[in-house]
Structure formats: C-alpha cells, structure tokens
Amino acid sequence: MDDEEDVRHALRRLLRSAGFDVLVYGSGREFLRHAAGGAPDCVVLDLHMHGESGFDVQHALAEAQLPIPVVVLTGCDTRANRARALANGASAYLTKPVDAELLIDAIVAAMRDRHA
C-alpha cells in the first residue's frame, strides 16, 4: 500500500516476479474496505500517505482484530517512526529505496511467523 503509483507498480512487478499474488492499494481507506472481506497474508505499508497514514492503518487493523502481518516500507525513516511502527506490531521496518531480496525475505518471514 503506497500512495505513489510508480512505487505501487514497481512493488507489484517485483513481488509477482518472486511468486506472490499481489493486490495494490493507493490508500489506507481503499485497503481497509477490501481487507474486511478477505485478509491478505501480509501487507507492505508506507507510513506517509494522503488521507490515512500507515499508523492509522495499523491502528484500524488492531481495532478490527485482523492479525495481518505488516512490513513497513517508508521513505521517511526516523527513530520515532521506527519505534512507533514496531510498537504497533510491524513485523519489519524497511526504508526506501529497498533491496529487493531484503523486502522479499521480510515478507516471507512475516508470513511464516503468522502461520507458526
């Protein structure tokens, strides 16, 4: 989930090439509407988006008791953002630009931990 179309396109291409089924969303509101009908195995989440922030999405997932692993991928890396995202339950916190292998490994680990 990212509000930048080029980032969504690049992530979709990368993750599909790694064998993942991928749905992309441009806003937290759009994602949350769909998540209620069928939760994904993992969410790659930007923190700073138009409308709801990534923190708002994390809060909404917790409120709805949707145990979806979250991998944060942000271009705004601060100590406070990292601490808050991890305290809110993020499985991993990565920064843009991200190494493809590192992102894929974080997603696989988050999904594995969910099903452990």
Image (cartoon, rainbow, N blue to C red):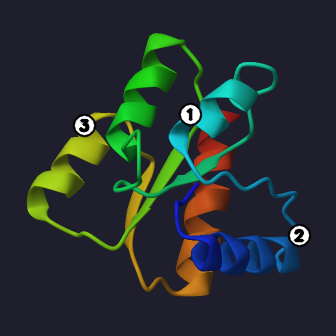
Query: Which residue has dot 1 on it?
Result: 29
Q: Residue at x 61, y 47 (%)?
A: 43
Residue 35 in the figure: left or right of residue 17: left
Q: Amino acid at mark 2?
A: Gly
Specify whether residue 116 is in view.
no
Q: Secondary structure at mark 3?
A: helix
Q: Secondary structure at mark 1?
A: helix
Q: Secondary structure at mark 2?
A: loop
Residue at mark 2 to residue at mark 1: CA–CA distance: 26 Å
Residue at mark 3 to residue at mark 2: CA–CA distance: 30 Å
In percent of width and height, residue 111 lies at: 67, 47
Task: Give the quarter of the image for residue 69.
Answer: top right
In the orientation shown, which residue stands out farthest toward the top?
A: 64
Q: Amino acid at mark 1?
A: Arg
Residue at mark 1 to residue at mark 3: CA–CA distance: 22 Å
In percent of width and height, residue 5 lies at: 62, 71
The answer to whether the residues at label 3 and label 2 have Cβ atoms under 8 Å apart is no
Query: Which residue has dot 2 on it?
Result: 19
The answer to whether the residues at label 2 and label 1 have Cβ atoms under 8 Å apart is no
Query: Which residue has dot 3 on it?
Result: 87
In percent of width and height, residue 81 lies at: 19, 54
